[in-house]
Amino acid sequence: MAKVPTPKELTRINYRPPAKSWMDTKPEFRPGVYLNAPSPKWLEMIGYPYPRKWSVPDEDWHLPPDWKEIILAGMEDRLKRFRTLKLFFDICVRCGACADKCHYFLGSGDPKNMPVLRAELLRSVYRRYFKTAGKLLGEVAGARDLTEDVLKEWFFYLYQCTECRRCSLFCPYGIDMAEMTILGRELLSSVGINIEWVMASVASCYEKVGHIGATPHAYKDMIDFFAEECERITGILPEVTYNRKGAEILFIAPSGDYFADPGTYTYMGYLLLFQYLGLDYTISTYAAEGGNFGYFISHEMGKRLNAKFYEEAKRLGVKWILGGECGHMWRVCNQYMTTWHGPATFLEVPKSPITGTVFEHAREHKMVHICEFTADLIHHGKLKLDPQRNAHLKLTFHDSCNTSRAMGIFEEPRYIIRHVLPEGHFFEMPPNTIREKTFCCGSGSGVNADEYLEMRMRGGFPRANAVRYVHDKYGVNHLGCICAIDRAVLPTLMAYWVPGMEITGIHELVGNALVFDDEIERTTDLRDRDLVGVGKAEEAEGEAEDE
Amino acid sequence: MDFFKRHFSVAFLAVIGLVVIAFIGVKANLQLLFGVVIPYLAILIFIEGLVYQIIRWLRSPVPFRIPTTAGQQRSLGWISRDLGEKLDNPANTMQTLGRMALEILAFRSLFRNLRAELREMPETYAGGKLVYWSYKWLWLGAIAFHYAFLVVLLRHLRFVTEPAPAFVNLLGEVDGFIQFYVPTVYLSGIVLVVAGLYLLLRRIYTPTLRYISLAADYFPLLLIISIATTGILMRYFIKVDITAVKELVIGLATFKPKVVPGIGVILYIHLFLVCVLFAYFPFSKLMHMPGVFLSPTRNLPNNNRAVMHVNPWNYPVKFHPYLEHEAAYREAMYEAGLPVEILPESAEKEE
């Protein structure tokens, strides 16, 4: 793997664009800043076009002979199907308000990472082939030929956009780079240009269990293991059922939460909560992936993976679906799922069996975010919580891009946090870096591959920079989030930029704080770390204790 | 010639060229062409072009409801949302209209603008830190530019109507309330030029902006600044016969066009540049004006989970059905105690 520069080396960022025009510069495919080409087998598994062996740094990408026609026809087709694309191509005034909003631009200084210019990479081709001025005047009208170099540039920069939509927040016309990135990646896919990390996840998820490609029985083992861990620590053994017909609720979590730490602790939190409530729920081995890497390559692949949700809900005959803590899963759920597959008439409007709350805002979707569900429980006083069990945490909260700018779930997680943490243990990062203005983790939209580490550390710099601020100022030692990709990538990001920070899901904290009537005396949290007031941790209150 | 120089000089020379064309045209006694034919043509192209482009946009559907949410969503009843949050994350049509109004009339998103700066701090672990501050200059420049333009445009109604509507006269009075020169100086004209110059200069002197700017960015700014400048020149310095001008314009407006003699060449230059602006409008980035009304990240409520949004080209996709999933793992699932739809052969043998 490529050597990643040190933080000090990395922050020597030059924001001055080069003297050469952007039309004349080419990306440099050096290790650490590009993503690997996929193995053809993944493409074959999902019936994706032009599976072949190719390599990014190679000169020849073995494109199909008529690649140019395919791309242009694909662009024309998408212009017909998406008003967004036409509009976002036509109305940008290049005011530059988006420029320093992008985490990749802030972390790399590469002018083509200014959303406006990243969009121009596509727009210039649009002008050349679809606009009269561009056809006639060429470069002076901001138009340029579609060449292999341009295609390679698309690949380079469309995977240096994590579809976080921070630029669209600041754009006076709401031009959404994410939309153009999604459609641009679709075009790349149409000539067989994809990345290994996404394609492996998509193909695995398509046929097996989750992005990690587990088997149903291995998946069951993992979750049974979490239940046993819960019992070891709390004395409570959550009862888990799988693929159970007639359950009231189908619970779907992202695979990050059962695949690796610290997501697994969040999963333990879910199980403890459901056990506490005596919830009539089941987990599916078929609709076992909340996340959706398909959405990172095309609308259609997103839909093909997401189809499992309603299919399984229908087969099992549940009343509604409860969704775990995940970012892009909830973008898909909030903005696409009902349109793709609705109306889900076989389900009922979600109603909390504990509080009786009817989730009216989800009456068509029939699916509830677990933070909405839990906040409602706490609001109705249905949970006995001991915040002192989280007293070893000083927490800040990272709003995930997708749930922030494509949904707006800000108060629910904060409400939960305030009830599971002791007073004075929660600290917000500076206002320009949270809520709708939050920064991406730097690894969203399927670019969280190892070979991409340098770029991820660059993209994550603005996020880490804000965490550093509360870490230094208030001694914050935990970074909370409601996104599985965050839980997968933030530990690496923090180890690089803010060593000593731990990452936690919100329901892990709920699991810590929940007081069961018949539990054993708790001496540790779900991570086996001593609670404050127990053993030697007493003097070390407030300090991070690494395991 | 580098990219910037090429793009800037194309725009600059184009505007100079337009001025020269009008000047020569009038000197060659083509008043009919420049005073009647071209204005009609320009208006025709403007209207047709505008309608054509908007219809071209509307012909593409909005398959997904993808508003950019900038505030707390509407979810649980007890989570209160203030007016700002309702407008930044609208849940219904009224709130969406409010969001649109704020965007269009007050440039809401631009008002949010921040500046980021990397401060070097070699003694720290990271070697530097990013800081952000509110940066309203672009918003101020843009809003001054647009509103000044609007006021100037409305004031011109007095050339088209006889007598001028009351609000136009009122506007003129307000616009000229600071009296320090004769004739009364309209602030809007000055603001338009100053704001236009600001927008132009930031484009030229901000390295990143200069890097991305095209001829299509310089041209409309130069054109509008030239229009405003010729207008100001005409009003205060190189006076033209106002009565004659009004006769010409009313003639155009009432479809009884006639060439009015004795109008100075500066009026024709001014008018020609305005005509070019109108004719250029539908084919340029100036289409952001109608475009902002149609932007799907702004003009849709965030209520997808409550009200289904229909995609007209939605089509069925191939997915991996449950039974295929089970078939691949039936034996192992059964052994692990997972419920299955169809019992594996081994299980049947046991029975």
Image: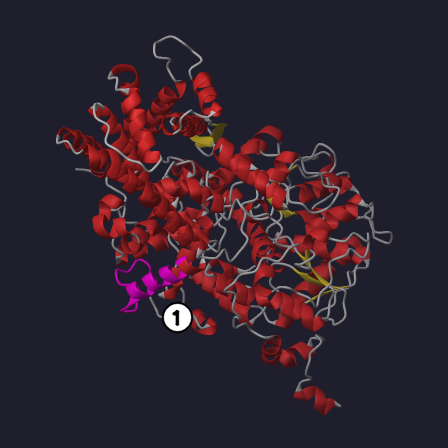
Q: Residues within 10 Å of mark 1 (few under 14, many from 20)?
A: some
Amino acid on which the number 1 mark rests in the picture: Pro
Mark 1, chain letter? A
Question: Where is residue B91 drawn, in percent x and y?
Answer: 63, 46
Q: Residue A181: horizontal and vertical position, in percent?
A: 42, 53
A71 part of magenta stretch:
yes
A83 in relation to A419, above or below: below
- Name the residue nearer the viewer: A215 or A398: A398
Q: In the drawing, does residue B124 fall left or right of residue B256?
A: right
Residue under label 1, please give it: A49
Quarter the C terminus of chain B occupies: bottom right
Q: Nearer the viewer, residue B71 or B229?
A: B229
In magenta, the rendered stretch is: A55-79
Q: At which x and y percent is residue A160? A: 41, 49
Query: Could one spot residue B214 in this view of the protein?
Result: no
Q: Secondary structure at mark 1?
A: loop
- Direction from residue A217 to residue B57 in the image, left or right: left
Residue toward you, B249 or B117: B249
Residue A233 showing in the rendered view = yes
Which quarter shows the N terminus of chain B?
A: top left
Give residue A197's position: percent from left, percent from top.
46, 60
